[in-house]
Amino acid sequence: MPFREINSKMVEATLAPGQKLFSQRGAMLAYRGEVSFTPNIQGGQGGVASMIGRRVAGESTPLMTVEGSGTVMFGHGGHHIQVIELAGDTLYVEADRLLAFDGTLQQGTMFMGSQGGVMGMVRGQVTGQGLFTTTLKGHGAVAVMAHGGVIELPITPGRDVHVDPQAYVAHHGEVRNKLSTAVGWRDMVGRGSGEAFQLELSGSGAVYVQASEEKL
């Protein structure tokens, strides 16, 4: 179910009978047609296990199920929206970044320590994000939120991408991540915050980076 970008801060989804999507509660701006909105207590397509996993992980951003026939417009907090199309791969994204996603996608939770070992855990502490992250897998579209717009950077074998952890939004593909220290890196680029860390991503896929260090 593709999302149509109305502008940088609003998207529209077209629903047909038998289709459904999930969205962050409060993200619906307007709709046309016969559309229903119900609180989601099943944890999305991942079922009860996914719901329990997110609660343990602190990833408890409330969702609503959207079904019916019509068009629905979504936006939230004036944040910029990026639509990501998945073709059978997995998207890793923080729960509070999710605006809406196709109901056919399988939702789960991943412990960040399993990508990068202890450094993956440290990343969660440094960025202020949880040690767990939400995963969406399958064929479908995902609308994520960010500050100041988003750029997609390809990750290819032998060409790692280094990202400021605060600017990281999401990534997909066969990607490994670890947090590396770079003494003087912050001072060198003029931030001087003392957080001399880079998120290093390697493998094959893409990472989405926002044009800001602000959290949602």
Image (tube, grey):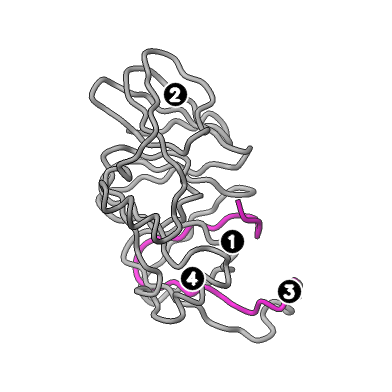
Label 2 sits on residue: 72
Label 4 sits on residue: 161
Read off the magenta span.
191-216
**Residue 138's spot in the image, x, y percent?**
25, 48
Residue 214 is inside the magenta segment = yes
Earlier sequence position, callout 4 versus callout 2:
2
Q: In this view, does 193 lie above or below 216?
A: below
Label 3 sits on residue: 193
| Distance from Cα at disc 4 to Cα at disc 3 | 21 Å
Earlier sequence position, callout 2 versus callout 3:
2
Residue 212 is inside the magenta segment = yes
What residue is rendered at 76% in x and 75% in y?
A: 192
Type of amino acid at the residue the image marks with label 2: Val
Type of amino acid at the residue the image marks with label 4: Val
For disc 1, the neighbor class at 10 Å (few under 14, some 14 to 19, many from 20) is many
Type of amino acid at the residue the image marks with label 3: Ser
Label 1 sits on residue: 167
